[in-house]
Image (cartoon, grey):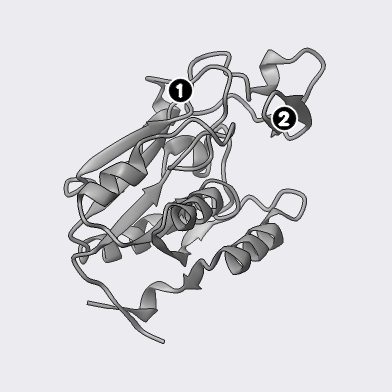
Amino acid sequence: MPVKITKRDALLIIDVQRDFCPGGALAVPHGDEVVPVINQIAARFSHIVMTQDWHPKNHFSFASRHRGKLPFETIDATYGRQTLWPDHCVQESAGAAFHEDLQIHRVELILRKGFHPDIDSYSAFQENDRATRTGLAGYLSERGIERVFLTGLAFDYCVRYSAVDARAAGLQAVVIEDACRAIDLDGSVEAARRDFLQSGVTVMRASELRY
């Protein structure tokens, strides 16, 4: 069913950064293909928020920090299981920059996440300890936003957790699937779909938007 965009809606563009695109340190397959889709639909939204992964060097989630561990292995953190990643999106690095073709001149907020040295952050709303808030829920509430449309990288990690947390914050959440790409690590795509169904997150395509 077509969905009409209103002034109570916000577009969330999640982590469309060089390190998550082909050639980057943690490339999501075909990650750069989201850019033209996002640019097309962003022009129709009154409110746009972007997130930016922004890790310090030697971040806890980097496999290089843990002797004998390789990227994509898991460890026990104080807040639960943690996937270890290649070093990526290090503060001030070229890989942390947004994709050069992403049109960001109308973005009203850039929210950086993952900057706490010992806590990873997938969601735009809270860190992986599920206690440290980013302040995004309050920002959207103050702006009168009732529904968020999520795009970006990756469908099964940062988009997934952001969408579920948006619902927990009392917002309607819609994932634009063709404006996302997935990592698909150990069944993470199917896990994302289950989470969306259980949380009441809607999944649709950009062609279903009406302006």
Q: Amino acid at mark 1?
A: Phe
> Can residue 99 be seen in this snapshot?
no
Q: Which residue is mark 1?
A: 115
Compared to residue 61, the image places residue 110 above or below, namely below
Q: Secondary structure at mark 2?
A: loop
Q: Which residue is mark 2?
A: 71
Q: Secondary structure at mark 1?
A: loop
Which residue extends farthest right? 68
Return the x and y of residue 11 as percentages of the image width and height: 31, 57
Q: Identify which residue, 211 or 33, lies in the foreground.
A: 211
Q: CA distance from mark 2 to mark 1?
A: 19 Å
Which residue is located at x 48 percent, y 49 percent?
162
Return the x and y of residue 7 as percentages of the image width and height: 18, 65
Numbered-mark total: 2
Q: Identify which residue, 54 or 168, lies in the foreground.
A: 168
Q: Identify which residue, 17 or 84, lies in the foreground.
A: 84
Q: Is 68 on the left or on the right of 197, as rendered?
A: right
Crowding near pointer 2: few (<14 within 10 Å), some, many (20+)?
some
Dividing the picture into quadrants, the one containing residue 42 is: bottom left
Q: Amino acid at mark 2?
A: Pro
Are the residues tagged 2 and 1 within 8 Å (C-beta)? no
Which residue is located at x 44 percent, y 74 percent?
205
Quadrant containing the C terminus in the rendered view: bottom left
Return the x and y of residue 146 as percentages of the image width and height: 30, 62
> Can residue 29 be seen in this snapshot?
yes
Which residue is located at x 47 percent, y 58 percent?
167
Q: Is 102 on the left or on the right of 125, as rendered?
A: left
Q: Identify which residue, 11 or 20, lies in the foreground.
A: 11
Which residue extends farthest bottom? 1
Compared to residue 29, the image places residue 26 above or below, namely above
Which residue is located at x 59 percent, y 24 percent?
87
Compared to residue 172, the image places residue 2 above or below, namely below
